[in-house]
Image (cartoon, rainbow, N blue to C red):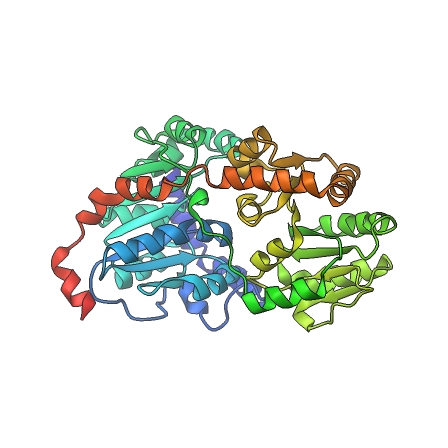
Amino acid sequence: MILSLYRILSGLGGPFIGVYLGLRKARGKEDRERFGERSGHPGRDRPDGPLVWVHAASVGESLSLLPLIGRLVSERPGLNILVTTGTVTSAGLLAERLPVGAFHQYIPVDRVSYVRRFLDHWRPDLVLWAESEFWPNLIYETTRRGVPMVLVNGRISARSLSGWQRFGGFIGQLLSKFSLCLGQTEVDAQRLRQLGAEGAKYVGNLKFAAPPLPADADMLAKFEYALEGRPRWLAASTHVGEEKLVGQIHQRLKANHAGLLTIIVPRHPDRGEDIAALLRDQGLSVARRSQGDALGADTDIYLADTLGELGLFYRLAGIAFMGKSLVPLGGQNPLEAARLDCAIIHGPHMMNFEDVTEGLRHTYGAEEVLDEKGLEAAIARLLDNPVERDRMAAAAGEVAMAEAGVLSAVTAELKPYLDGLSREALPRARA
């Protein structure tokens, strides 16, 4: 009943969807050059041969799937992989990192006519769906065509579980369309079973399979030379409200740490101008990377408002605060910092990474702080105690390596579905 009502309303809502997308485009949240993809119009021809459609909501999900995508194209020559996401940021990242054999398109908005246009063109042979973005029309129309769907790294937060349980029949109907559901953790697998995915299981978390974030070696060497001897720390993937706190902390810390540099990498680089203005109003000297500002001896804040360079700044900092965690938004992936020799500090709101955070806490590879005062004290202690910083970073690194075999475990689960793809299409794909 709810699914039928949703399908009717999403069809009737075409004019409203058009206005909504137009407003997003005007604000730079949609890709002007590829805007048609959001209504199912393809941006390129479908390649010959079998095609696996992989969907990830945004940047975080995309990063966790990149190792799996790489494994599939390397082990199965001729296999084509269509990767869809819904954000401009993720499209830019994937343009740089997708291997040969994989390509990106924007996911169509979940309206039946858009979805059918998308499926008519791409004709996927298998669909891998990441984490927790359950779009009813996309799921229903895909399986109606007999295409198997697999949920990989499925995630159901406690809050999502509570919300979905109010619509138990609806979510159960959607989950029943998946041939296999793999939870991101054992808890996620249990929650998926509670919601109706009877065979849901846990074989590992793909977030552990991601390689270290990349960095330009020449640029890293230049920064290391420029910053030699300067104490520094990083606030990574920050959100609104956190940059102000970081600026206040810097002001107090620099009195006892001569030459202190605070690096801020905002989660959304397009906020760079506003963040810089806010920090300068606090009396701080700010250099913006996007503007090519020089990093001088008197620079208080280096604002890295660019895309795809977080790996560079993790390598430089040694001490990393995970953004989105002092505000109740769920945190950022601490494994990225753990792989790059960082002592990790985070706030109390790490709901999106509960299992990873618990592992780090258990091994003392990360420290949780409750507020601005706690964050300031933790940073000061680590700046003053490099031995403790090294110990924490080493412990975090061990946690990051804890599930080294997860990629093989996931691909083993997918093998029956991949083996079932049209073998006679492979020679055409190679041609």
Note whether residue 107 is visible.
Answer: no
Horizontal placement of 147 versus 137: left or right? left
Residue at image location 32% in from the left, 53% down from the top: 71
Q: In the image, is residue 109 above or below residue 330?
A: below
- Indicate the position of residue 32 as horizontal and vertical percent values: 50, 71
Note whether residue 266 is visible.
Answer: yes
Question: Which residue reaches farthest left?
Answer: 424
Horizontal placement of 337 versus 161: left or right? right
Number of numbered tags placed on the structure image = 0
Q: Nearer the viewer, residue 26 or 354?
A: 354
Q: Nearer the viewer, residue 328 or 415?
A: 415
- Indicate the position of residue 302 as horizontal and vertical percent values: 72, 61
Q: Quadrant of residue 389?
A: top right
Q: Nearer the viewer, residue 363 or 385?
A: 385
Q: Quadrant of residue 1?
A: top left
Residue at image location 81% in from the left, 57% down from the top: 259
Q: Nearer the viewer, residue 332 or 336?
A: 336
Q: In the image, is residue 156 above or below residue 60?
A: above
Image quadrant in which the C terminus is located:
bottom left
